[in-house]
Image (tube, rainbow, N blue to C red):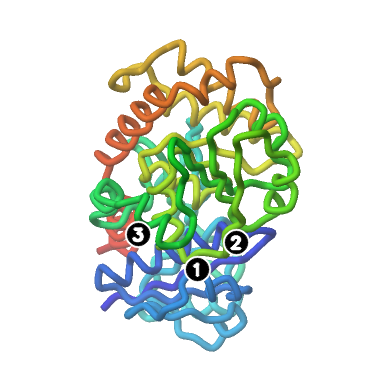
Amino acid sequence: MPIWDIFCRVIDNHGDLGVCLRLARDLAARGQQARLWCDDLSALNWMQPEAVPGLSCHHWDQAIEAAPGDVVLETFGCELPSAFVVAMATRPTRSAWINLEYLSAESYVERSHGLKSPQFSGPGAGLDKWFFYPGFTARTGGLLREPGLIDAAISHHGDAWLAARGWQRQPGERVLSLFAYPQAPLDEFLEALGPGWLLLLCPGAPQTALPPLLRPGQRALALPYLSQQDYDRLLWSCDLNLVRGEDSFVRAQWAGQPMLWQIYFQDDGAHAAKLDAFLDLSLDLSLDGADPAWASRWRALSRAWNGLSDWTPACAEALRERSAAVGQARSWRARLGMQEDLTSQLMAFARHASGG
C-alpha cells in the first residue's frame, strides 16, 4: 500500500488544511495510506471529528522521526523540514516529491503544471521536485472531487436537512450561506440583496458585523463550526453561496448553486487578475444557455463583492435573476465534471514522478 506524506502549514486561515484534509481523506478512500503533517491540527476537531481508516494526522515537528513515504506532497510551498528531505534523498527507493500549488484560472497554470525542478544543492541535492497545479482545464491537474460527489449533491434533500438543524426557511424565503473575510462589503451587499432571505452565517467576523445591517425582510442565523461533510451539505441546501479562499470555493462549484467568491486579498493587487481569469472561464458564453447581459451583470457583482468596482444597480439585478444564475452554475459544474478529478490525476502523476 503506497504511503503518502502530506505537509501543510496553517498561515492565517484554515483553508490550506481543509484542502489537504480532503485530499488525504480521498487518497485513503482509494486504498492509499495517507499521513497528514501540520503545525496546527486544532481545526481537525470540527473539520474531521471522526477517525478515517487509512488516514493519520501528526504534528509537523514529529516528521523528523518518520521514514519518508512513497510520495511526499509539499503543499502550497510550505518547505519541508530539512531532516525529512535528507531522509528522502537517502531512501533506497526515492520518494516522489511533489509541490501541490494553489488553484488559479490564470494562463500560467497550464504552462507550469507538471514541470520538474532538479535539486542541485541543499538537503535534497540529487532529488527532483515536481510541480502540480490544480485547475479548471484539461491541461491542469483538475479539482478535488470524490467519486459520487455530484450525484450526492443532486439527490440531497436540502430543506429537510436545514429543518433538522433548526435552520428552516419560512414560506417564500430563500436561503444563502455566507463565509467571508472581515473586509467583505456587507452593507452594500445587503442593500442589493433585498428582502426575502435567510442568511446562514459561517463562523467569522460577519457573525458579529452583519446582523445590525440587516434590511427589512432579511434574517440571519449564526452557525457553529461544521465538519467538511456537513459544510458540503450546507452548500447543497442553499439558493446562493458566498464563499472565500480555495476550499469552500471549489466545494461551492460542485454544489451547482449560484456562488459568489471572495478572493484572498493581496497587497500587490494580484487577486484582481486571478478573479477576472476565473470569471472569464466560468462566465464563458459557450456554456449552455449563457446570457451575455446577465453574465456582464454577474461579473459586475463579483467585482463589487471583492472591492474591485463600485456597486451599481446591475449588481442587484444579477442577484434577482435566479434562473440565469442557476443555469450557469449547473452548466459550469457539468463542464468541470468532464475533467478527471485531482486525486486520480495526482496518483497517476506520482507514479510518473517516481519512474513507475
Frontmost of labels 2 and 1 is: 1
Q: Pinpoint residue 155: horizontal percent, then vertical percent.
A: 24, 50
- Mark 2 and mark 3: Cα distance apart in space: 29 Å
Q: In the image, is 300 to the left or to the right of 148?
A: right
Q: Which mark is residue 353?
A: 3
Is residue 175 visible in the rendered structure shown here?
Answer: yes
Q: Residue at x 44, y 55 (%)?
A: 130
Q: Relative to 275, is 167 above or below?
A: below
User: Is the residue under label 3 in contact with that under label 2 (CB below 8 Å)?
Assistant: no
In the foreground, 218 or 35: 218
- Mark 1 and mark 3: Cα distance apart in space: 31 Å
Q: In the image, is 267 to the left or to the right of 116?
A: right
Frontmost of labels 1 and 3 is: 1
- The residue that disc 2 covers is 14
Three-letter amino acid code at the position of disc 3 = Ala
Which SS class for mark 3?
helix
- The residue that disc 1 covers is 47
- Mark 2 and mark 1: Cα distance apart in space: 10 Å
Three-letter amino acid code at the position of disc 1 = Met
* Residue 217 sits in quarter: top right
Q: Pinpoint residue 33: horizontal percent, then vertical percent.
A: 33, 77
First in sequence, mark 2 or 3: give its number: 2
In the foreground, 316 or 272: 316
Quadrant including the C terminus:
bottom left
